[in-house]
Image: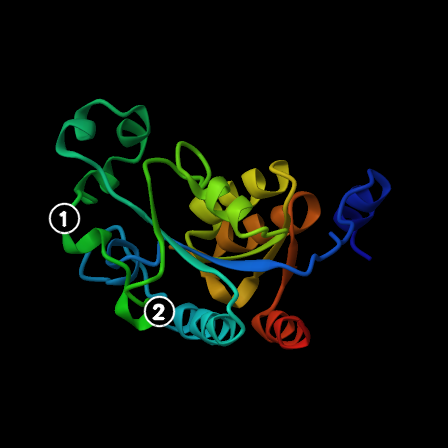
């Protein structure tokens, strides 16, 4: 065991969260602004989208909720939101543009809810928790982009809301390897169970 792992273990981190029996799949920001590399804010998420779709397909077959999120700003917000002063590359994610549309490769259907957010977490300033509560969800599987940004923030808020959280490492992506890997380690130690897509599939099939 590496010294880092010993340090976390001795501090009481890295315990496995118990899983519930009523999950939802939460697909965070797999919109074209993050997945179509013709846009500067995007990265190639093809493999992650493909694996995420295997989860959403089985979820629909089992009537498990599938919820998508996208970041979409009104024009007046571009010059006023503090986050956009730090991450100005996202100013082009405007309501009504292609950048804010969910990538069709995810298999999104017209009946799937799309939560529009204005910050990193899918919970902050949105009705996501109301949707999950209404569906009696106790566990969320967080997929999407980016690992170090919106995925991590969403996982943090989800566990703080009392939900168990799974993050399949091969269903999330980032613009660079280092923040992706560091964030997965941190998420697994403090906020969620970081697993792989096949493990989630096996669990969903048993429900």
* Residue at (68, 61) in percent of width and height: 21
All told, the count of numbered labels is 2
The residue under label 2 is 106
Q: Position of residue 132 (x, y in %)?
A: 52, 48
* Residue at (51, 70) in percent of width and height: 59
Image-quadrant location for residue 159: top right
Image-quadrant location for residue 76: top left
Q: Position of residue 102 (x, y in %)?
A: 28, 59
Q: Against 38, is 120 above or below?
A: above
Q: Nearer the viewer, residue 152 or 3?
A: 152
Q: Mark 1: give few (<14), some (14-19) or many (20+) Cα within 10 Å.
A: few
Query: Horizontal placement of 185 versus 95: left or right?
Result: right
Q: Position of residue 77 (x, y in %)?
A: 20, 28
Q: Against 110, is 70 above or below?
A: above
Q: Nearer the viewer, residue 138 or 147?
A: 138
Tell me the number on the disc at residue 96. Answer: 1
Q: Mark 2: give few (<14), some (14-19) or many (20+) Cα within 10 Å.
A: many
């Amino acid at each position: 065991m590496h010294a880092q792992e010993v340090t976390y273990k001795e501090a009481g981190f890295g315990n496995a969260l118990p899983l519930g029996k009523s999950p939802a799949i939460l697909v965070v920001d797999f919109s074209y602004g993050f997945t179509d590399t013709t846009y500067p804010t995007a990265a190639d998420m093809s493999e992650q989208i493909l694996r995420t779709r295997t989860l959403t397909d089985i979820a629909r077959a089992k009537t498990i909720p599938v919820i998508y999120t996208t970041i979409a700003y009104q024009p007046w917000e571009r010059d006023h939101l503090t986050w956009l002063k730090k991450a100005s590359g996202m100013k082009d994610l405007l309501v009504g543009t292609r950048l804010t549309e969910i990538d069709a490769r995810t298999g999104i259907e017209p009946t799937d809810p799309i939560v529009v957010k204005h910050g990193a977490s899918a919970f902050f300033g949105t009705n996501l928790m109301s949707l999950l509560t209404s569906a009696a969800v106790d566990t969320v599987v967080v997929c999407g982009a980016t690992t170090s940004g919106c995925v991590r923030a969403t996982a943090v808020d989800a566990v703080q809301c009392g939900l168990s959280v799974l993050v399949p490492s091969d269903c999330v992506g980032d613009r660079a390897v280092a923040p992706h890997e560091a964030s997965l380690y941190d998420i697994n130690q403090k906020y969620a169970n970081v697993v792989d897509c096949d493990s989630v599939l096996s669990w969903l099939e048993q429900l």
